[in-house]
Image (cartoon, helix red, strand yellow):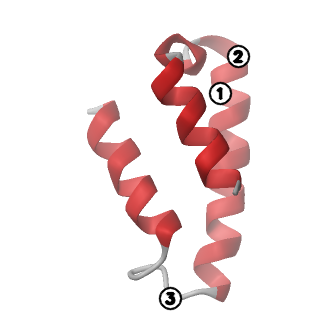
Amino acid sequence: MFDLLYFSAIISSPSVMDGKAGNKIRNLYEKKRKNLDNSVNSDNSISSLLFSAYKAKSQ
């Protein structure tokens, strides 16, 4: 659920990722994702797929 909210925010408003608010959101997401990676096989998880989509979008 967290991933879907995060990525819907990026898609609907890419400028959200600029500035301090964007950094806070990104840091929260990356901390959350590390916890998911520790507990789940990230290769097959939705989080991994969405995160790779985010990486591709940010490059």
Q: Nearest to the eye among marks 1 and 3: give it.
A: 3
Q: Is residue 47 above or below residue 57?
A: below
- In the rendered image, residue 30, in percent from the top left (x then y), is placed at 62, 52
Give the number of the disc on residue 52. Answer: none
Q: Nearest to the eye among marks 3 and 2: give it.
A: 3
Q: Is residue 45 left or right of residue 52?
A: right
User: How many discs appear?
Assistant: 3
Amino acid type, residue under disc 2 in the picture: Lys
Q: Is residue 2 above or below residue 27?
A: below
- Of mark 1 and mark 3, the one earlier in the sequence is 1
Instruction: Look at mark 3 in the image and give the residue it sits on.
Output: 41
Which residue shows up at 52% across the image and 11% down it? 15
- In the rendered image, residue 3, in percent from the top left (x then y), is placed at 61, 53
Instruction: Look at mark 1 in the image and give the residue it sits on.
Output: 23
Amino acid type, residue under disc 1 in the picture: Asn
Which residue shows up at 59% across the image and 28% down it? 9
